[in-house]
């Protein structure tokens, strides 16, 4: 057996409302559902992107096991090579500081920035991973 893709990934945030606005307005994700004070779930292409309040996901409320994390995490979103300049302009136009830009040995390109919770985010081209 071998997993062939990531179906969902999750970051933990203390302020769900600020994070929801950021991921809709800056990243352009489509909100699927929200549980006030607990989580916000977005669609990202053929995958799901989850934001959880770590304090609430430590409380058993359903069939899933208790889980959660504290501290800054990381997620990378794909961009096409032709979109690098557009993403840079978009982020800067929305007042999002780009921490660094990286040209990878593989020819890939990444822009790194932070969400309101301090999570490290990246938009990167498929060449970063030779995809």
Image (cartoon, helix red, strand yellow):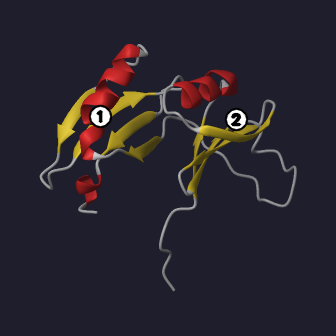
What residue is rendered at 76% in x and 45% in y?
58
Image position of 113 (left or right of 27): left
Q: Name the residue under label 1.
A: 111
Q: What element carries label 2?
A: loop
x%, y% of residue 92? 34, 17
Q: For the view shown, which residue lies furthest in the front direction?
A: 82
Q: How far apart are marks 1 and 2 (CA)?
A: 26 Å
Residue 53 — which label? 2
Q: Quadrant of residue 64?
A: bottom right
Q: For the view shown, which residue lies furthest in the left direction?
A: 105
Q: Mark 2 Cα within 10 Å, few/some/many (few <14, many 20+)?
A: many
Q: Is mark 1 on a helix, strand or loop?
A: strand
Image position of 30 (left or right of 71): right
Number of marks present in the image shown: 2
Image position of 93 (left or right of 16): left
Image position of 37 (left or right of 116): right
Upstream in sequence: badge 1 or badge 2: 2
Above or below, 44 relative to 70 = below
x%, y% of residue 87? 34, 30
x%, y% of residue 16? 68, 28
Q: For the view shown, which residue lies furthest in the bottom direction?
A: 1
């Amino acid at each position: 057996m071998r997993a062939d893709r990531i179906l969902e990934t999750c970051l933990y945030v203390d302020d769900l409302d600020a994070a929801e606005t950021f991921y809709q307005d800056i990243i352009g994700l489509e909100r699927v559902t929200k549980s006030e004070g607990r989580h916000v779930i977005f669609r990202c292409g053929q995958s799901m992107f989850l934001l959880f309040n770590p304090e609430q996901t430590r409380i058993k409320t359903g069939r899933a096991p208790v889980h959660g994390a504290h501290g800054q995490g990381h997620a990378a979103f794909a961009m096409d090579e032709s979109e690098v300049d557009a993403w840079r302009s978009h982020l800067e136009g929305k007042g999002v500081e780009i921490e660094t830009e990286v040209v990878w040995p593989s020819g890939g390109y990444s822009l790194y920035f932070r969400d309101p919770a301090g999570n490290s985010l990246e938009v990167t081209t498929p060449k970063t991973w030779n995809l």
